[in-house]
Amino acid sequence: MSPTNGRRIFIAGANGATGRTLMKLPQAQDANLVPHYRPKSAQGKTLHPQAAVLDLTDAQALDAAMQGCTTVMQLIGTMRKRFSTGDTYETSDIDTTQYLMDAAKRCGVNHVVLLSSVGAGKPTGAYLKAKAKAEAIVTNSGLDYTIFRPSAFHGAGHRAPPGMRFLMGALGMHRFRPILIEELASSLLHVAQTGIAKGQILEGLSLWDVVAAS
Ligand SMILES: NC(=O)c1ccc[n+]([C@@H]2O[C@H](COP(=O)([O-])OP(=O)(O)OC[C@H]3O[C@@H](n4cnc5c(N)ncnc54)[C@H](OP(=O)(O)O)[C@@H]3O)[C@@H](O)[C@H]2O)c1
């Protein structure tokens, strides 16, 4: 496989914990990546040479940035404690997914990699319902997709309860086993570059199989 495998990957949410971890991976250095930042989050930062700085509501700017991309990776999401900044599940998790899928179709993207959450298949509560809506936007888009449904993250500012990773593995509750953010980022990039697991929703053992292959 060449370093890029012919894939050019638009990374929405590059400024988040997963996105930052992915951008620092050794294998990301030779990949063809277009990391996306909101204008307010790009201020004062030294950015990647191919960075796309724009508001995702700006369809014209989004199309220009996505031109030539084969893949869209959607890592955007929010949490209730950030609602005071103006972000909500509707604006962050759902609407951005719609803007990205609309642009992906206009720009000829042929693979979407969505970071969702364990539990989105049987959603209870506003967070998981938003994740389920984002998943439906992707699965109804007509584009090839791979959806990741990990459990709690560990690393890059996230901390899973101590012992939970071991305990969930020992009990065979693989869906709820916390994931190291480096292994998540590495698996997301591997799937985006190889196109494996197309049409799959990765949760529990299927997710851990991809982690092991990455
Ligand atoms: N934490 C967990 O344990 C866990 C478990 C399973 C799944 N997940 C999901 O995994 C995903 C990634 O998590 P993370 O911890 O890496 O995320 P994070 O650190 O919270 O970062 C979220 C990213 O989304 C961006 N964003 C939010 N609203 C936006 C908008 N309206 N337009 C453009 N960008 C927007 C943020 O941009 P700014 O930097 O500009 O604010 C940031 O880059 C989330 O969807 C989360 O729900 C998390």
Image (cartoon, rainbow, N blue to C red):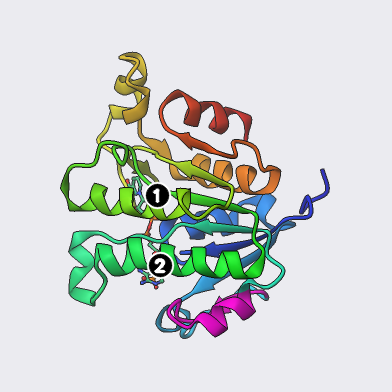
Q: Quadrant of the N terminus?
A: top right
- Disc 2/disc 1 C-alpha distance (Å): 12 Å
- Side (left or right) of 127 relative to 41: left
Picture layout, residue 83 above or below residue 198: below
Circle 2: is it few (<14), some (14-19), or many (20+) Cα within 10 Å?
A: many
Type of amino acid at the residue the image marks with label 1: Glu
Asked if the residues shown at circle 2 and circle 1 are in contact, with their CB atoms under 8 angstroms apart, the answer is no
Q: Which mark is residue 96?
A: 2
Q: Quadrant of residue 195?
A: top right
How far from the left and from the top, in percent, is residue 118? 33, 38
Q: Residue at x 24, y 49 (%)?
A: 129
Q: Quadrant of residue 29?
A: bottom right
SS category of the residue bearing label 1: helix
- Side (left or right) of 206 relative to 169: right
Q: Is residue 60 magenta?
A: yes
Picture layout, residue 15 above or below residue 112: below
Q: Nearer the viewer, residue 200 or 47?
A: 200
Type of amino acid at the residue the image marks with label 2: Thr
Q: Residue at x 54, y 52 (%)?
A: 142
Q: Nearer the viewer, residue 143 or 21?
A: 143
Q: Is residue 2 magenta?
A: no
How far from the left and from the top, in percent, is residue 10? 60, 64
Asked if residue 46 can be seen in this view, the reply is: no
Which is more N-terminal, label 1 or label 2?
2
Is the residue indicated by label 2 positioned so its CB lies within 8 Å of ligand 1?
yes
Q: Nearer the viewer, residue 91 or 45?
A: 91
- Side (left or right) of 152 relative to 196: left
Q: Residue at x 59, y 36 (%)?
A: 197
Q: Quadrant of the C terminus?
A: top right
Q: Which residues are magenta?
A: 50-65
Q: Nearer the viewer, residue 132 or 89?
A: 132
Residue assigned mark 1: 135
